[in-house]
Amino acid sequence: MEDIKTIEWVNGKVRILDQSQLPEELVLLEISDHHGIVNAIKNMNLRGAPVIGIAAAFGVVLSIWNAGESDRPGFLGKANKAIDELKATRPTAKNLFWALERMRNCLSGNLNKSIREIKSALLKEAEKILSDDIKTCKTIGKLGAELLPNRANILTHCNAGSLATGDYGTALGIIRAGVEAGKKIKVYADETRPLLQGARLTTFELLEDGIDVTLVCDNTAAFLMQQSMINMIIVGADRIVRNGDVANKIGTYGLAVLARHHNIPIIVAAPLSTFDFTLESGRDIPIEERAAEEVIRCGSKLVAPEDVKVYNPAFDITPHYLIHSIVTEKGIIKPPFFENIARLAKNKT
Ligand code: MRU
C-alpha cells in the first residue's frame, strides 16, 4: 500500500481513498467541507477506528478553512458546531471522540491568537494526529511481532490495516512487522459480513504487499480452528474499557469463544486513543446499529426479502477473560487487565 494514501490534506481539501468502492475501483474523493467528512464517515467511504478520528480532525479544519478573519464569534461557532456534528457520526470508536477532544483543546488553547494563527494551529494538530498514528502503528507492529512464532497461521477479522489507520495498520501492522522480521506468516481473512471489510479490504491490502492471504467465509472460522489450521487470532478494536473488555467488529466475540475452546490465543492490537478510561465494563460501550439495507443487499443485489426484520449491530463486546493480550504503542498488556490498564492510564503521557 506504499503509493496509495488512505487520507491526506491536499491544498485546503481532504483527499481520501473511497473504501466503499474497493476492490473494484480505486477512487479518490476530494472533500472540501466538513459535511463531506460527516457523510464519508457515516456512509463508510472511510472506516476503521483510527482513521475515523483522523478524518474528523481534518473535518474540523475544513469547517473553518475558508472562514473570514474578522468575525471571531462566528469562527468559533463554526468550529464548535462542526465538532458536535462530527461527534454524532458513529458512536462506538473511541478514537473519534479522542481526536475531536484534541481538536477542541487545540482550539481553546489558541484563543488568544489571530484567526489565521488558529487555523494553522488546527491544521498542524490534525496533521500531527495523522503522523502520530502512523508512528504508533509501526510501534504496535514491532512490539506485537515478538508474540508471533516463526511460523504463524493467523486469522484476522474485518480490516485493521493501512486502510483503517493513517498507514501500516494495527492487527495488520503486527503481521507486516512479522513478515519484515522474516517470519513465515500465512493469513486467513474472514470475509466479515455484512460490509465485507475482510474480503474487500484486508485481502486487497495484503495482496498489494505480497503477503500470503486466504479469504474464508465467516462461518469457516470454527472449522479452520478444529483442523488446527490457525495458531493465533489478531484483531483490532474500536473501544477498550478499564476492565479490558473490547468492542470490535461484530463477530469478534464469536471468534474469541471459539479461540478459547480450541486453546488459541486471541490478540487485540490498538493504540491508546482506542482506550476509554472513563468506562469500567464493556456493557457501557454504545454499540452502533446500522441500516437493514446493509444486510438484505449484497452490493446492489437483494439477498433477502426487502421487508424482513433485520438486526444489524456493527460491533460486539469481547469480554476481557477471553483475551490473551492487548498490544499498544506503550507495551503489551496481559491479564490482570484491570490493574494493568490502570497502570497504563497513569503512565500514558
Ligand atoms: O465498521 P468498521 O469497518 O469501521 O469497523 C472496523 C473495525 O471493527 C476495526 O477492527 C477497528 O476499527 C480497528 S481498525 C484499526
Image (spheres, rainbow, N blue to C red):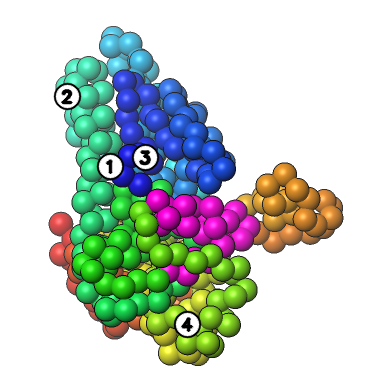
Q: Is residue 4 above or below residue 298?
A: above
Q: Position of residue 24 (x, y in %)?
A: 57, 43
Mark found first going from the N terminus, 4 or 2 = 2
Amino acid at dot 1: Leu
Q: Is residue 191 magenta?
A: yes
Q: Are marks 3 and 1 in contact (CB under 8 Å)?
A: no
In the picture of the structure, the residue carrying the numbered disc 4 is 229
Amino acid at dot 2: Asn
In the picture of the structure, the residue carrying the numbered disc 2 is 112
**On residue 244, which mark appears?**
none
**Front: mark 3 or 1:** 3
At horizontal 75% and vertical 48% (from top left) the residue drawn is 301
Mark found first going from the N terminus, 4 or 3 = 3
Magenta extent? 187-208
Label 1 crowding class (10 Å Cα cut-off): few <14, some 14-19, many 20+?
many
In the picture of the structure, the residue carrying the numbered disc 3 is 4
* Pointer 2 residue Cβ closer than 8 Å to ligand 1: no
Q: Gap between marks 3 and 2, in whole Å?
A: 39 Å
Q: For numbered disc 3, what is the local secondary structure?
A: loop
Amino acid at dot 3: Ile
